[in-house]
Image: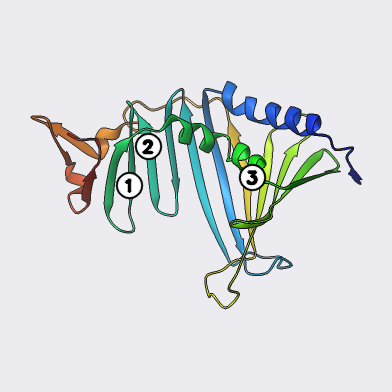
Amino acid sequence: MVTAGNLTAQNVDSDLEKIESIYDNNKKVIIHKQINYYKNVADKKPEESVTSELKRDGSNYYSTAFNVETMVTKGVSVLVDHNSKTILLDENDPNELDESLKLGISSVKSSSSKIDFKKVGKQGCYTFHFKSGDHLKAELWFNSETFYVEKIVYYPNITNTDEADSYSKVEILITNYNTTFQPDEQKDFNIYQYIKVSNSEITVTEKYKEYKLINNIGY
């Protein structure tokens, strides 16, 4: 059954605050996502699908998608691009980390010009409309009882429909949310599997000797 909500700014702020508090309060978590790309909005099957994993342990963060790994720990971030065989070492931006954990909800709401709400069974859905930018609208689907996000759907603002790599809909499914995560100290959040420090010089490890290191932290 589909019902339209009596939408007020208070409803939206309250619901989004509850959704974001889940990600704030769970200091140890693994989130598995499946990202589906559709050529046409009406398509039943995606043109392409990509799996993604996100791990958090306090201020430590790790994600992988599109053959790229991102790790934030010890005040630095490491981005390993297996496509271009580069390792980017940079200072950590805590604001960017927070936004990643919250699935970009805050930035979506702040840039929207109109918000609609509907409820389908136990699922609530906020639709954010945009007058300009990269997207026409975005849908945030969540469990209305637990406030766990289950799906986010973006509708890109395609200005050139002749582009071969353009998609009309991008769907992000949250396939697993695990709050019993126990990190492996040798593997999870260990930047020294990528880089090593010797005599104040940072170089790549033997495993990544074919990768180019881009060091932006100044030493």
Question: Mark 1 near mark 3, Cβ–Cβ under 8 Å?
Answer: no
Q: Quadrant of the C terminus?
A: top left
Q: Tell which residue pokes out farthest to the left in this image.
A: 199
Q: Is residue 182 left or right of residue 115?
A: left
The image quarter containing residue 49 is bottom right
Residue type highlighted by circle 1: Val
Q: Which mark is residue 28?
A: none
212 shown above or below 123: below
Q: Which mark is residue 71?
A: 2
Front residue (pair 206, 8) = 8
Question: Mark 1 near mark 2, Cβ–Cβ under 8 Å?
Answer: yes
* Residue position marked by numbered label 3 in the rendering: 111
Residue type highlighted by circle 3: Ser
Residues under labels 1 and 2: Cα distance? 9 Å
Front residue (pair 208, 99) = 99
Precedes in sequence: disc 1 or disc 2: 2
Q: Is residue 165 left or right of residue 18?
A: left
Precedes in sequence: disc 1 or disc 3: 1
Within-10-Å neighbours for mark 2: few <14, some 14–19, many 20+: many
217 shown above or below 75: below
How far from the left and from the top, in percent, is residue 72?
A: 38, 33
Q: Which mark is residue 80?
A: 1
